[in-house]
Image (tube, rainbow, N blue to C red):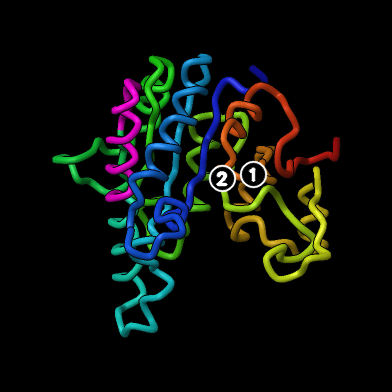
Amino acid sequence: MKYQRILLKLSGEALAGDRQEYVINPQILERYAKEIKKVVEKGVQVAIVVGGGNIYRGSEANVSGIDKVQGDYMGMLATVINGMALQSAIEKQGIYTRLMSAIRIEQVCEPFIRRRAIRHLEKGRVVIFAAGTGNPYFTTDSAASLRAIEIEAQVVLKGTKVDGIYTADPMKDSSATRYNNLTFDEVYQKGLNVMDMTAFTLCKENNLPIIVFDMNQEGNLLRIVEGEEVGTLVAMEAN
């Protein structure tokens, strides 16, 4: 395996899928759990950060008249719900998991403790990090970067609905072309939207590569950890 320890970032919207009647689509959950199982069975240590946008986005608080800080905490709780759903789906595949929260909710998940998280990974458990960083004004992208650095992951894998980073939005511009790899500086210069700036800067300063890929394509996650070129790699130096 090219990577022995990874941090997988999933958006909350990804869990909902395209069917409007679902907040959390059970078919998507099962599909993701099976993809994660393939990687775990190869001996790869897997940590996951999941967003909460399918339930509530803290950035929408001002529109609804909710205090910004209150809205961010509501968003954190949404990630806990998604984390619980993902935990259940993965355990149905026979894989041991631990759900760790940045805010204390002992009845449903462990508090985040760095050394304990690393120990869980070393024992082959999938660790799901919920509640973002535990602080308002920070996104789950920032949480993904921070947790990846803390657990000494070798890469952040950002699973999306598109197969990489494009010159423009491929949904709107048919002439958009995909980058195979980019440097952190090139992403800055081109103004490409990979992660929010705080998260992206954390990765750059800690020399932590990011791979943006299509999580909905069967086998992609396994191909990446085996070393195949899938999606778009962002690193300090171009390959």
**For residue 117, which quarter of the picture?**
top left
| Relative to 21, 48 lies left or right | right
Between the C-alphas of marks 1 and 2, the distance is 5 Å
Q: Mark 2, residues whose alpha carbon is within 10 Å: few (<14), some, or many (≥20)?
A: many
Which is nearer the N-term, disc 1 or disc 2? 2
Classify 96 as above or below 14.
above
Q: Which residue is mark 2?
A: 159
| Circles 1, 2 touching at the beta carbon (< 8 Å) | yes
Q: Position of residue 77 (x, y in %)?
A: 28, 56
Who is closer to the viewer here, 49 or 165? 165
Q: Which residue is mark 1?
A: 213
Residue 102 covered by magenta stretch: no
Left or right of 116? Residue 168 is: right
Amino acid identity at mark 1: Phe
Tell me the residue at 32%/70% (across/down). 71
Looking at the picture, which amino acid does disc 2 mark?
Gly
Q: Nearer the viewer, residue 195 or 28?
A: 28
Q: Which residue is drawn at the image coordinates 76% and 69% (left, top)?
A: 173
Mark 1: which secondary structure?
strand
Secondary structure state at the residue bearing disc 2: strand
Is residue 88 part of the magenta span, yes or no? yes
223 left or right of 145 in image: right
**Residue 153: which quarter of the image?**
top right
Give the quadrant of the C terminus: top right
| Vertical relation: 156 (above or below) 185 | above
Determine crowd level at label 1: few under 14, some 14-19, many 20+ residues with C-alpha closer than 10 A. Answer: many
**Magenta stretch?**
80-98
